Amino acid sequence: MEICWLIELTGNTFGRVFRATTFGESHGPALGVVVDGCPSRLALGEEDINAELRKRRPGGSAVGTTRVEEDKAEILSGVFGGKTTGTPISIVIRTTGASSSAYEPIKNVFRPGHADFAYWAKFGFRDWRGGGRASGRETVGRVAAGAVAKKLLARFGVIVLARVVEAAGVKAKPLEVAEKDIGKLGKAVYSSSVRCADAIAGKKMADAIEKARAAGDSTGGIVEIVATGVPPGAGEPVFDKLDGELAKALAGIPAVKGVEFGSGFGAAGLRGSENNDSFYYDAKARKVLTRTNNHGGMLGGISTGMPIVARIAVKPTSSITGRQKTVNEEMDSVDIAVAGRHDPNICPRIAPVAEAMVALVLADAMMLQGMIPRKL
Amino acid sequence: MEICWLIELTGNTFGRVFRATTFGESHGPALGVVVDGCPSRLALGEEDINAELRKRRPGGSAVGTTRVEEDKAEILSGVFGGKTTGTPISIVIRTTGASSSAYEPIKNVFRPGHADFAYWAKFGFRDWRGGGRASGRETVGRVAAGAVAKKLLARFGVIVLARVVEAAGVKAKPLEVAEKDIGKLGKAVYSSSVRCADAIAGKKMADAIEKARAAGDSTGGIVEIVATGVPPGAGEPVFDKLDGELAKALAGIPAVKGVEFGSGFGAAGLRGSENNDSFYYDAKARKVLTRTNNHGGMLGGISTGMPIVARIAVKPTSSITGRQKTVNEEMDSVDIAVAGRHDPNICPRIAPVAEAMVALVLADAMMLQGMIPRKL
Amino acid sequence: MEICWLIELTGNTFGRVFRATTFGESHGPALGVVVDGCPSRLALGEEDINAELRKRRPGGSAVGTTRVEEDKAEILSGVFGGKTTGTPISIVIRTTGASSSAYEPIKNVFRPGHADFAYWAKFGFRDWRGGGRASGRETVGRVAAGAVAKKLLARFGVIVLARVVEAAGVKAKPLEVAEKDIGKLGKAVYSSSVRCADAIAGKKMADAIEKARAAGDSTGGIVEIVATGVPPGAGEPVFDKLDGELAKALAGIPAVKGVEFGSGFGAAGLRGSENNDSFYYDAKARKVLTRTNNHGGMLGGISTGMPIVARIAVKPTSSITGRQKTVNEEMDSVDIAVAGRHDPNICPRIAPVAEAMVALVLADAMMLQGMIPRKL
Amino acid sequence: MEICWLIELTGNTFGRVFRATTFGESHGPALGVVVDGCPSRLALGEEDINAELRKRRPGGSAVGTTRVEEDKAEILSGVFGGKTTGTPISIVIRTTGASSSAYEPIKNVFRPGHADFAYWAKFGFRDWRGGGRASGRETVGRVAAGAVAKKLLARFGVIVLARVVEAAGVKAKPLEVAEKDIGKLGKAVYSSSVRCADAIAGKKMADAIEKARAAGDSTGGIVEIVATGVPPGAGEPVFDKLDGELAKALAGIPAVKGVEFGSGFGAAGLRGSENNDSFYYDAKARKVLTRTNNHGGMLGGISTGMPIVARIAVKPTSSITGRQKTVNEEMDSVDIAVAGRHDPNICPRIAPVAEAMVALVLADAMMLQGMIPRKL
């Protein structure tokens, strides 16, 4: 069989001026990230990173994997006397407790829904332990970088919050998020085992996820990300629009199959008179606002000052214990049942990653626009 | 009222090695594009560009604007003796018949759904004639660049085809596109006034679009783009995934509010056992294939060799003749009814732009991977 | 004979946020540039461009080619009502009076000192008329872009001036340029046929150039570029230092074989106690300054506020009428004597190109640092 | 006193497809680099890195600092089973034995010739211990990345060698390096305490360096870098020329004040008939070559297949024990005598850094051109 033997060129750096370069494989000695371009004089410590890493950890609930991931960040550079110096911030998270034995028997088999075949086609050589670089574990570096971006954005009044709005076929009550409510919403979200602000729906989600898991299967869902406090004027017209950058950032999260903004796919069925948002001037706030937010906070690829609203479609976890047909590197037809500890529904753990990616996009776009000064 | 006075930084260049830089405003003297990085010795002439520009022109049907756009490309550089030299290909399309009079009365008013306010917030100064740089007319440069990319891709067996699958609330019959059928499908698409391969649905779409137009309103829809012939191994892991690049390229098209791949938002409601695609080895074709294509031709951000499938949600055209509330640059509340000739549904004209953007992404990714050599 | 058949990837865009993409071949229909990222509301007209293009034109003196180059810029986009809009500024210069007949007989011969062989090795196909893309004529696009950068820099008190300090073996009197003297110096430079501020040396240079030309030969020299008014703090540490960016910009000018800053190669023979510049505080100017300027205005890759001083070594023009040995595309050994009208010494015409390149670097670095706001 | 408070944006990443991002401060917990884009299946181990790091270490001779730098690389990612996987290679070098006490008394003083003032102007906050990020110690990350590039290049027959050709006023015998002699030359260079291939001159250099050091002073010199085996066709015309990239890479090394190629600044005094290199065809080698190499292996910014030859001017070390005048952060005039252990002449230690930078440029340019495949 002929195959194109190729290799990646770059692909591991995100951003233009606020930049993150992640590294590391699932079962390698360490994962991490180098954050370059962060303003100087931002108060930053390892606990800032660790707090975000904990949100990404599998919870104690039914919906997470039962693996224990003890993620502790070490900052190797770029911080002096508790403040950023403006030089690259290198963050390393050592791997602990990785067990590669479950992967040994399937090291030359292409798991359905996974990147095994694509990596093999591309690199001709892969670290098969725990999915190597294509593992969801790689996102630990993104969350660490996002922690720095979120700390920076908070200084400028920008808050990013992701929550599960659909999981395992259960939908949360629709909610148009207003800027003033984001704090309260965050508390509800972070106290939910499935990161759903609607407590009743959240309970049903957890049940439906568990039911599928018990049947050896997995489920998907939808995560909504809202960012408040972004001033009008961020984003570059034409090819580097703010929605374009967000679409790339979110579509690049493992398991994401779709991205939409504001009225999204629903806009396809609306009329212009319904979908257009009327502008008005709020004299007290001294701001131009819109009555509705079908545009999701961006027009012409530039922020309008309204909350930025995005939703992502998350596919059901590819690793399932049920038997599936596939092939191996020798082109033999084989059956596979993926053992190991896997998330039956990945939505609650994708939420902090989505927050991190949106925070990286916004920190970058706002610095590029001069909305965030280069020295705090 | 305080506003952030800022300006774009870049934003007008797309691609890494096969690069396009567009320029021009709706009613300026000319629009165009500089294509850099195209391999040498590709046969290329102005007619190659003009053929694609004609697909973008408003048709004679009910669904297009009644403006006449006579788009003729002039190649200023990069081609010698009918072949590319490997140096930048500059393409200019002169503006003819622009009439700015309809825009004069609303030059300081922010049209709902348009980028007027966002550009004003960002640049503090804008060319209000026909929407300036934020006009859909800007896409003429993208289509010209896409024409070069499509010609190059065709040499390597890659075909990109976009078609309307929903418009004005009318859905076309679902269709999983197989590689061998793409040629026939293209003929059906290009002969339809609404670029819909399903002739019966296409007729209903045209009627529904016209009905809304007669009521002073506009409609939206969904466009599906399929690319066949892309070998496995294109795309860069982690941040520059092939789906990430496509999401950015497609979300950056004016009026697009959502992007999805393969099973897309539908994946949210499926189980892993339903959504995973089984691999098998086709001994005759000497290829690894999948039985179904819920993954849309990409896993882990890398192409698998299956057809690449993307869908975009297109909002209803923002310019409607019905009366709307808004504000102007002086923060006065005003009413507006947008005159001028506008597309009542933009889907058929967005299709060739979507084809161009997907072609640009694929030419770039395949060159970056060495799948397209640097000299033909 | 085996040869690597390859093609360029990009290479025609300069800058990060203030960006220029040039296009065009020596004898093609037009050359030009797209300037992206210029702040909005800068007053700009075609005459601003033409004034700089005239400086690049061969003068009436003995030292320039006798070709007539009537360069007239047309602005196609990005300017509205006499001011920049913040969108891409496309500038086109039509070719007039190109005569390719002198190149026809040597179209498959590799001229010594020229890029013919290298382009052939790289692209496998080249526009041989007048050197194609590798012609010095390509710099017309750089000078056009530089004109925009210079106009922008002038608004912020930055002046860039290049002058010939050595030509055909004749050295001008050494001169440490002080910020206050740059205006007067410019007048002397622009009124000299060889762009030398030292009138006596300039006369001798012209004579020596003419003497070599009469002998069928060519000569080289040294050009010094000084930029005053750059505030301290521009430039990015480590890999994108301000001197690094300048070195790349200047080394990329055709015929340049060396670049140095401040004490330059002379520093190799000095002791630390001689080469270090003492800092002092000028209380009246409220500035930290240095007593001497061996550092050439940059330390650690960052501007210090002192004048930036660079010098470039320019090789003798490769086209000479004397007979030389070489090979052709068929690997035959052949003799060549390059006919056509060529500059016997290119230094006076490289000076405005060097000014343009330094202006592009400084506009980019200062915008990146927030020293130039994004809206004027 | 007013100062521009600004911060870097990026600046810590080098390369386009073979990319290196360095991090770390002189006295921070660790320094390191992330290498992205290296082909998969290259044999690589920590000893490959350590061997290059040892070349950078201060030798036991009179000419190096007496500090002991125990540099041991740890590879955290991108290597599996002794081979690269194509994913980012993260390399960390822990700091040992740093002593910040000598810097405490001068932590708010701007050392002449150093980046202290410039960093202060730019960031408003700096890690003053050992020069922080602006320390020569930062180059440890460059050398680690260069080790990977050199190992890759060697597989394709490319060898990079830097040697000292002038130090403390003593010049080595001129030598035009031929491709076949590079191996023998390397042995002579690596066995010299001052990295000079000319043993007699090398002895005189060591004496002259020591004499200046004993007088509390420092000296400079010139380093020449030769790369053999680069095929014709590497480098991108116009703005990203191979000499342009090399100039930027070399000018960005701390203490470098000038860069030249081939005949360099000497070309300014030559005639065209002297400086042009005649082409001929070597039928046995099946290669186009030139009789002389004044062009230094590049024409039109593209490699010709001849050895690439560059020279850099290195200023005398800024840290001297003699008393100098300067100011502090409070704008007071103060005297300073820099204590601590410093290199009296940095040329021998800059040589391996120059090798690393040239290797990074060549690996990047050759991969971009398809000369190095993406999978080994």
Image (cartoon, coloured by chain):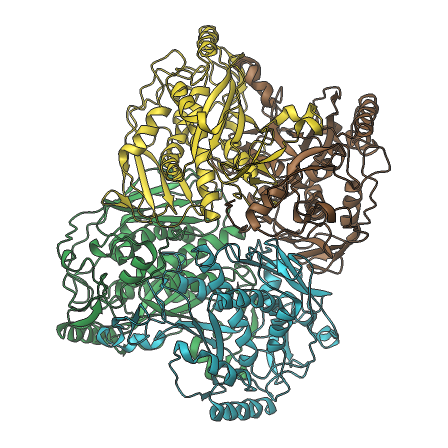
Chain colours: A green, B cyan, C brown, D yellow
Q: Quadrant of the N terminus of chain B?
A: bottom right
Q: Where is residue B350 in the image (x, y as percent from the top left)?
A: 54, 76
Q: Where is residue A330 in the image (x, y as percent from the top left)?
A: 22, 62
Image vertical order of residue C249 relative to residue A134, above or below: above
Count of picture labels = 0
Image vertical order of residue B114 relative to residue C334, above or below: below
The image quarter in which residue D260 lies: top right
The residue at 40%/76% (across/down) is: B179
**Residue D333 shows up from this direction:** no
Image vertical order of residue C63 relative to residue A161, above or below: above
The image quarter in which residue B321 lies: bottom right
The image quarter in which residue A280 lies: bottom right
**Residue D176 shows up from this direction:** yes
Residue nearest the viewer, comparing B90 with C355: B90
The residue at 61%/26% (across/down) is: D263
Q: Position of residue D67 (x, y in %)?
A: 34, 18
The residue at 59%/28% (across/down) is: D292
Q: Position of residue B320 (x, y in %)?
A: 60, 82
Whether residue A230 sits left or right of residue A117 in the image: it is: right
Whether residue A145 sits left or right of residue A291 in the image: it is: left
Residue nearest the viewer, comparing A259 with B7: A259
